[in-house]
Amino acid sequence: MASLLLIQPRAEDIAGQPILRPLPSAKCRSVGPFVFFDHMLEQAYPPGSGMNINSHPHIGLSTLTYLFTGELQHKDSLGSDQHVRPGDVSWMTAGRAVAHVERTPEALRRTGSRLHGLQVWLALPQELEEGEPSYSHHPAASLPRSEAMGVQITLIAGSGFCLESPVPIHSPTLYAELKLQAGASLLIPAEQRERALYLIDGEARLEDDELPLHSLAVLPEGEELLLSACGECHLALIGGEPLGPRRMFWNFVASDPALLEQAKQRWASGDWPQVPGESQRIELPSRT
Protein backbone atom coordinates (compact mmCIF):
# COMPACT_ATOMS: atom_id res chain seq x y z
CA MET A 1 0.00 0.00 0.00
CA ALA A 2 1.21 3.49 -0.83
CA SER A 3 1.70 5.79 2.15
CA LEU A 4 -1.34 7.43 3.69
CA LEU A 5 -1.53 11.21 3.77
CA LEU A 6 -2.52 12.05 7.36
CA ILE A 7 -4.03 15.47 8.03
CA GLN A 8 -4.16 16.78 11.57
CA PRO A 9 -7.19 19.04 12.04
CA ARG A 10 -6.97 22.54 13.39
CA ALA A 11 -9.12 23.48 16.37
CA GLU A 12 -11.74 26.19 15.93
CA ASP A 13 -14.53 27.66 18.01
CA ILE A 14 -17.75 28.62 16.24
CA ALA A 15 -20.22 30.50 18.46
CA GLY A 16 -19.04 28.53 21.49
CA GLN A 17 -19.09 25.16 19.70
CA PRO A 18 -15.66 23.46 19.56
CA ILE A 19 -14.74 22.28 16.06
CA LEU A 20 -11.99 20.18 14.52
CA ARG A 21 -11.36 21.08 10.85
CA PRO A 22 -9.05 18.87 8.74
CA LEU A 23 -10.31 20.28 5.42
CA PRO A 24 -9.18 22.45 3.82
CA SER A 25 -5.51 22.21 4.74
CA ALA A 26 -2.19 23.14 3.18
CA LYS A 27 -1.57 19.42 2.52
CA CYS A 28 -4.93 18.75 0.94
CA ARG A 29 -7.44 21.29 -0.38
CA SER A 30 -10.19 18.81 -1.23
CA VAL A 31 -11.20 15.15 -1.43
CA GLY A 32 -13.50 14.53 -4.39
CA PRO A 33 -16.10 17.32 -4.17
CA PHE A 34 -15.50 17.81 -0.41
CA VAL A 35 -13.78 21.14 0.22
CA PHE A 36 -14.59 21.57 3.91
CA PHE A 37 -14.97 19.11 6.81
CA ASP A 38 -15.97 20.13 10.32
CA HIS A 39 -16.22 17.73 13.25
CA MET A 40 -18.47 19.37 15.85
CA LEU A 41 -17.03 17.86 19.01
CA GLU A 42 -19.47 16.63 21.63
CA GLN A 43 -20.45 19.62 23.72
CA ALA A 44 -22.78 19.95 26.72
CA TYR A 45 -24.86 23.12 26.78
CA PRO A 46 -26.34 23.98 30.20
CA PRO A 47 -29.88 25.38 30.48
CA GLY A 48 -30.12 28.86 29.01
CA SER A 49 -27.43 28.29 26.38
CA GLY A 50 -26.85 26.62 23.03
CA MET A 51 -25.21 27.08 19.67
CA ASN A 52 -26.38 30.15 17.76
CA ILE A 53 -24.90 31.00 14.36
CA ASN A 54 -26.64 34.07 13.01
CA SER A 55 -27.51 34.69 9.37
CA HIS A 56 -24.52 34.22 7.05
CA PRO A 57 -24.12 33.77 3.27
CA HIS A 58 -22.91 31.04 0.92
CA ILE A 59 -22.24 30.67 -2.80
CA GLY A 60 -20.97 27.87 -5.02
CA LEU A 61 -21.39 24.92 -2.66
CA SER A 62 -23.73 22.52 -0.89
CA THR A 63 -23.68 22.15 2.90
CA LEU A 64 -24.54 18.86 4.57
CA THR A 65 -25.19 18.61 8.31
CA TYR A 66 -25.34 15.20 9.99
CA LEU A 67 -25.76 14.87 13.76
CA PHE A 68 -24.91 12.02 16.12
CA THR A 69 -26.34 13.74 19.20
CA GLY A 70 -28.58 16.75 19.78
CA GLU A 71 -30.72 18.90 17.53
CA LEU A 72 -30.31 22.02 15.39
CA GLN A 73 -32.79 24.40 13.81
CA HIS A 74 -32.00 25.31 10.21
CA LYS A 75 -33.56 28.44 8.71
CA ASP A 76 -32.67 29.91 5.32
CA SER A 77 -33.51 32.62 2.81
CA LEU A 78 -35.65 30.16 0.84
CA GLY A 79 -38.11 30.11 3.74
CA SER A 80 -37.02 26.71 5.13
CA ASP A 81 -37.44 26.21 8.89
CA GLN A 82 -36.38 22.69 9.78
CA HIS A 83 -35.35 20.88 12.96
CA VAL A 84 -32.46 18.49 12.27
CA ARG A 85 -32.16 15.46 14.54
CA PRO A 86 -29.59 12.63 14.84
CA GLY A 87 -29.25 10.63 11.64
CA ASP A 88 -31.08 13.21 9.50
CA VAL A 89 -29.44 14.91 6.52
CA SER A 90 -29.83 18.68 6.19
CA TRP A 91 -28.84 19.49 2.58
CA MET A 92 -28.61 23.06 1.32
CA THR A 93 -27.31 24.03 -2.12
CA ALA A 94 -26.26 27.67 -2.24
CA GLY A 95 -25.88 28.24 -5.97
CA ARG A 96 -25.54 31.95 -6.66
CA ALA A 97 -26.70 33.13 -3.20
CA VAL A 98 -28.32 31.82 -0.05
CA ALA A 99 -28.25 32.82 3.62
CA HIS A 100 -29.02 30.61 6.60
CA VAL A 101 -29.12 30.36 10.37
CA GLU A 102 -28.16 27.38 12.55
CA ARG A 103 -29.07 27.27 16.23
CA THR A 104 -30.11 25.12 19.14
CA PRO A 105 -33.93 25.06 19.22
CA GLU A 106 -35.53 27.20 21.92
CA ALA A 107 -36.98 24.23 23.82
CA LEU A 108 -33.50 22.70 24.22
CA ARG A 109 -32.02 26.07 25.19
CA ARG A 110 -34.40 26.09 28.15
CA THR A 111 -33.61 22.54 29.31
CA GLY A 112 -29.97 22.20 28.25
CA SER A 113 -28.67 19.82 25.59
CA ARG A 114 -25.69 18.10 23.99
CA LEU A 115 -24.46 18.43 20.42
CA HIS A 116 -22.15 16.23 18.35
CA GLY A 117 -21.96 15.84 14.59
CA LEU A 118 -20.38 16.65 11.25
CA GLN A 119 -20.83 19.41 8.72
CA VAL A 120 -19.24 19.20 5.28
CA TRP A 121 -19.23 21.45 2.23
CA LEU A 122 -19.23 20.04 -1.29
CA ALA A 123 -18.18 22.21 -4.22
CA LEU A 124 -20.63 22.49 -7.09
CA PRO A 125 -19.77 21.65 -10.68
CA GLN A 126 -18.79 24.81 -12.53
CA GLU A 127 -22.02 24.91 -14.56
CA LEU A 128 -24.11 24.92 -11.33
CA GLU A 129 -22.12 27.48 -9.32
CA GLU A 130 -24.52 30.29 -10.22
CA GLY A 131 -27.65 28.17 -10.26
CA GLU A 132 -30.81 28.35 -8.16
CA PRO A 133 -30.41 27.66 -4.43
CA SER A 134 -32.37 24.80 -2.86
CA TYR A 135 -32.93 22.97 0.43
CA SER A 136 -34.04 19.45 1.30
CA HIS A 137 -34.32 17.50 4.54
CA HIS A 138 -33.90 13.72 4.63
CA PRO A 139 -35.05 11.95 7.82
CA ALA A 140 -32.81 9.26 9.29
CA ALA A 141 -35.26 6.53 8.28
CA SER A 142 -34.90 7.49 4.60
CA LEU A 143 -31.15 6.77 4.46
CA PRO A 144 -30.04 3.31 3.27
CA ARG A 145 -28.18 1.09 5.72
CA SER A 146 -26.53 -2.29 5.75
CA GLU A 147 -25.41 -4.37 8.71
CA ALA A 148 -23.46 -7.61 8.57
CA MET A 149 -20.59 -9.32 10.39
CA GLY A 150 -20.16 -6.51 12.90
CA VAL A 151 -20.15 -3.69 10.33
CA GLN A 152 -22.90 -1.08 10.06
CA ILE A 153 -22.87 1.28 7.06
CA THR A 154 -25.14 4.30 6.63
CA LEU A 155 -24.94 5.91 3.19
CA ILE A 156 -25.32 9.62 3.96
CA ALA A 157 -24.91 10.92 0.41
CA GLY A 158 -23.96 9.51 -2.97
CA SER A 159 -23.46 5.82 -3.62
CA GLY A 160 -21.23 3.00 -2.45
CA PHE A 161 -21.29 -0.47 -0.85
CA CYS A 162 -24.29 -1.29 -3.11
CA LEU A 163 -26.29 1.51 -1.43
CA GLU A 164 -27.57 4.82 -2.79
CA SER A 165 -28.67 7.82 -0.73
CA PRO A 166 -31.75 9.92 -1.64
CA VAL A 167 -29.78 13.15 -1.11
CA PRO A 168 -29.73 14.99 -4.49
CA ILE A 169 -25.97 15.29 -5.06
CA HIS A 170 -24.53 17.17 -8.05
CA SER A 171 -21.44 15.08 -8.86
CA PRO A 172 -20.11 11.55 -8.13
CA THR A 173 -19.91 11.38 -4.33
CA LEU A 174 -19.36 8.92 -1.50
CA TYR A 175 -20.22 9.90 2.08
CA ALA A 176 -20.78 7.10 4.57
CA GLU A 177 -20.91 6.61 8.33
CA LEU A 178 -19.15 3.41 9.41
CA LYS A 179 -19.51 1.63 12.75
CA LEU A 180 -17.40 -1.48 13.36
CA GLN A 181 -17.48 -3.84 16.31
CA ALA A 182 -14.21 -5.04 17.81
CA GLY A 183 -12.50 -7.49 15.45
CA ALA A 184 -14.70 -6.62 12.45
CA SER A 185 -13.24 -5.58 9.11
CA LEU A 186 -14.43 -3.86 5.93
CA LEU A 187 -12.86 -3.66 2.50
CA ILE A 188 -12.82 -0.04 1.30
CA PRO A 189 -13.46 -0.24 -2.46
CA ALA A 190 -11.61 1.82 -5.05
CA GLU A 191 -14.76 2.83 -6.96
CA GLN A 192 -14.23 6.52 -6.18
CA ARG A 193 -11.15 8.28 -7.50
CA GLU A 194 -10.45 10.14 -4.24
CA ARG A 195 -11.26 8.89 -0.72
CA ALA A 196 -10.48 9.72 2.88
CA LEU A 197 -11.31 8.23 6.28
CA TYR A 198 -11.88 10.23 9.47
CA LEU A 199 -11.78 8.34 12.77
CA ILE A 200 -14.45 9.84 15.01
CA ASP A 201 -14.06 7.45 17.94
CA GLY A 202 -12.34 4.18 18.84
CA GLU A 203 -9.31 2.38 17.43
CA ALA A 204 -8.85 1.17 13.86
CA ARG A 205 -6.20 0.16 11.37
CA LEU A 206 -6.05 0.50 7.60
CA GLU A 207 -3.98 -2.43 6.31
CA ASP A 208 -0.86 -2.14 8.54
CA ASP A 209 -1.29 1.51 9.50
CA GLU A 210 -2.96 2.69 12.69
CA LEU A 211 -5.48 5.46 12.08
CA PRO A 212 -4.93 8.35 14.48
CA LEU A 213 -8.03 9.56 16.29
CA HIS A 214 -9.55 12.75 14.82
CA SER A 215 -7.26 12.75 11.79
CA LEU A 216 -8.18 12.61 8.12
CA ALA A 217 -6.41 9.80 6.29
CA VAL A 218 -6.35 10.43 2.53
CA LEU A 219 -6.22 7.05 0.78
CA PRO A 220 -4.00 6.23 -2.20
CA GLU A 221 -5.88 6.26 -5.48
CA GLY A 222 -6.96 2.99 -7.06
CA GLU A 223 -6.22 0.67 -4.12
CA GLU A 224 -8.73 -1.50 -2.26
CA LEU A 225 -7.80 -1.32 1.42
CA LEU A 226 -8.82 -3.34 4.46
CA LEU A 227 -10.18 -1.41 7.44
CA SER A 228 -9.95 -3.35 10.72
CA ALA A 229 -11.44 -2.47 14.11
CA CYS A 230 -9.08 -2.91 17.06
CA GLY A 231 -12.05 -2.08 19.31
CA GLU A 232 -15.46 -0.62 18.63
CA CYS A 233 -14.94 2.30 16.27
CA HIS A 234 -16.87 5.01 14.46
CA LEU A 235 -15.66 6.60 11.21
CA ALA A 236 -16.73 8.79 8.31
CA LEU A 237 -15.71 7.91 4.75
CA ILE A 238 -15.75 10.67 2.13
CA GLY A 239 -14.81 10.65 -1.52
CA GLY A 240 -15.79 11.15 -5.10
CA GLU A 241 -14.68 12.65 -8.38
CA PRO A 242 -12.57 15.83 -8.06
CA LEU A 243 -14.10 18.96 -9.60
CA GLY A 244 -10.93 20.94 -10.21
CA PRO A 245 -9.40 23.82 -8.26
CA ARG A 246 -11.69 25.99 -6.15
CA ARG A 247 -11.04 29.34 -4.50
CA MET A 248 -12.43 29.93 -1.01
CA PHE A 249 -13.06 33.04 1.02
CA TRP A 250 -14.98 32.76 4.27
CA ASN A 251 -18.26 31.00 3.36
CA PHE A 252 -17.84 31.43 -0.40
CA VAL A 253 -16.53 28.80 -2.85
CA ALA A 254 -15.99 29.46 -6.56
CA SER A 255 -13.91 28.42 -9.56
CA ASP A 256 -13.72 32.08 -10.66
CA PRO A 257 -12.19 34.62 -8.22
CA ALA A 258 -14.51 37.29 -9.68
CA LEU A 259 -17.48 35.45 -8.15
CA LEU A 260 -15.86 35.69 -4.72
CA GLU A 261 -15.36 39.43 -5.10
CA GLN A 262 -18.95 39.92 -6.22
CA ALA A 263 -20.25 37.93 -3.25
CA LYS A 264 -18.12 39.91 -0.79
CA GLN A 265 -19.40 43.21 -2.15
CA ARG A 266 -23.03 42.07 -2.17
CA TRP A 267 -23.02 40.77 1.41
CA ALA A 268 -21.19 43.84 2.71
CA SER A 269 -23.73 46.15 1.03
CA GLY A 270 -26.76 44.17 2.20
CA ASP A 271 -27.71 43.12 -1.33
CA TRP A 272 -28.48 39.52 -0.37
CA PRO A 273 -31.54 37.28 0.18
CA GLN A 274 -32.77 37.55 3.76
CA VAL A 275 -33.73 34.81 6.20
CA PRO A 276 -37.37 35.52 7.17
CA GLY A 277 -37.74 36.74 10.74
CA GLU A 278 -33.98 37.18 11.29
CA SER A 279 -32.33 40.55 11.89
CA GLN A 280 -28.93 39.53 13.30
CA ARG A 281 -26.21 38.66 10.79
CA ILE A 282 -22.52 37.86 10.71
CA GLU A 283 -20.53 40.62 9.02
CA LEU A 284 -17.97 40.04 6.31
CA PRO A 285 -14.53 39.41 7.86
CA SER A 286 -11.73 41.76 6.90
CA ARG A 287 -9.63 38.76 5.89
CA THR A 288 -9.79 34.96 6.15
Image (cartoon, grey):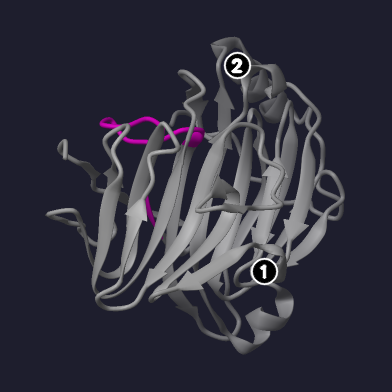
Task: Indicate left or right for 242 with 22 as reference.
Answer: right
Task: Indicate left or right for 286 with 206 as reference.
Answer: right
Whether residue 185 is visible here, answered yes or no, is yes
Q: Quadrant of the C terminus?
A: top left
Which amino acid lies under the numbered mark 1 shown in the image of this protein?
Answer: Ala
x%, y% of residue 167? 69, 49
Q: Residue at x 18, y 53 (%)?
A: 207
Magenta stretch secondary structure, dominant: loop
Magenta highlight range: 19-34
Residue 203, picture quadrant:
bottom left
Q: Residue at x 57, y 12 (%)?
A: 256
Residue 144, picture quadrant:
bottom right
Could you tell which of marks 2 and 1 lies nearer the N-terminus?
1
Dot 2 crowding, Cα within 10 Å, few <14, some 14–19, many 20+: few
- Residue 261's disc is 2
Q: Residue at x 36, y 50 (%)?
A: 188
x%, y% of residue 79? 87, 50
In front: 13, or 66?
66
Which amino acid lies under the numbered mark 2 shown in the image of this protein?
Answer: Glu
Q: How many marks?
A: 2
Task: Indicate left or right for 58 with 22 as reference.
Answer: right
